[in-house]
Image (cartoon, grey):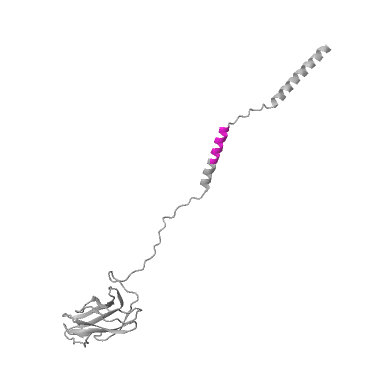
């Protein structure tokens, strides 16, 4: 009887040990196998990561929006006030001093001949050469023709310039403008003008011989 009890106890202990061993085995997790990564997969992953970084950098950079095509600044050119075909000289100068005959608004009889004389001065830095001429440029010529200088005129010298004219046959106020020019046709100096009044009540003005 005692042997049977001992045997039962031993069997119970064996069974308990088996249960305990099984519990301990279940508590210890079985390690999972580590996957093997190929070299090609590593390279592909690195390239994808680099491209993603570039994309993020491009997104983060500010976008430069053009503000429009710049308009070139044009430098203003000097305006030439001289009429086409009428060049002007640089070192020559002429200043009108006074009207010797036929002052402005002098009454002249219709068709009357007269002489207009201006006193002028060479105020330039060059001598007026022989061949320079006083030329009609605008208005009413009144029959006058160009006056050609026969002698040079020194710098600072004064000279009288006279032109033979004829009053128009119609009534009214008439003006003619004249200028001195070089032998090449370059104008210089002051304008010289004549203004007369032609009417029934007009009287001849004093004249002078050129």
Q: Is residue 33 above or below residue 121?
A: above
Q: What secondary structure do most residues of the magenta stretch adopt?
A: helix
Q: Position of residue 137 (x, y in %)?
A: 25, 75
- Left or right? Give the position of 50 relative to 28: left
Residue 1 belongs to magenta span: no
Check the image and report above or below for 138 versus 34: below
As rendered, which of 95 and 167 lies closer to the eye? 95
Question: As drawn, which residue projects farthest toward the top?
Answer: 1
Which quarter of the picture shows residue 207? bottom left
Residue 17 percent across, percent down from the top left: 76, 20
Q: Is residue 97 above or below residue 185?
A: below
User: Depth check: 31 or 95 in front?
Assistant: 95
The quadrant the C terminus occupies is: bottom left
| Image quadrant assignment for residue 104 | bottom left
Q: What residue lies at 53% left-to-right and 47% top-to-bottom?
A: 60
Residue 177, image x, y percentages: 25, 78
Comparing 205 with 65, the one in front is 205
Q: Residue at x 55, y 39 (%)?
A: 49
Give the magenta-colored segment's residue range: 39-50
Indicate yes or no whether the magenta region holds residue 48: yes
Identify the image quadrant of residue 201.
bottom left
């Amino acid at each position: 009887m005692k042997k049977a009890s001992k045997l039962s106890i031993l069997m119970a202990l064996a069974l308990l040990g088996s249960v305990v061993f099984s519990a301990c085995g279940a508590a210890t997790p079985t390690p999972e196998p580590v996957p093997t990564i190929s070299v090609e997969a590593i390279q592909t992953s690195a390239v994808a990561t680099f491209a993603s970084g570039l994309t993020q950098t491009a997104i983060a950079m500010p976008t430069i929006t053009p503000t429009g095509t710049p308009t070139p600044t044009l430098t203003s050119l000097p305006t030439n006030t001289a009429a086409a075909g009428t060049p002007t000289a640089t070192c020559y100068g002429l200043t009108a001093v006074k009207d010797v005959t036929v002052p402005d608004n002098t009454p002249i009889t219709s068709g009357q001949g007269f002489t207009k004389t201006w006193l002028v001065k060479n105020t330039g830095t060059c001598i007026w050469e022989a061949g320079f001429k006083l030329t009609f440029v605008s208005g009413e010529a009144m029959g006058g023709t160009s006056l050609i200088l026969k002698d040079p005129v020194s710098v600072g010298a004064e000279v009288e310039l006279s032109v033979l004219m004829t009053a128009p046959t119609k009534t009214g106020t008439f003006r003619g403008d004249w200028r001195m020019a070089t032998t090449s046709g370059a104008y210089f100096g002051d304008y010289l003008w004549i203004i007369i009044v032609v009417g029934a009540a007009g009287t001849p003005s004093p004249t002078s011989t050129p």
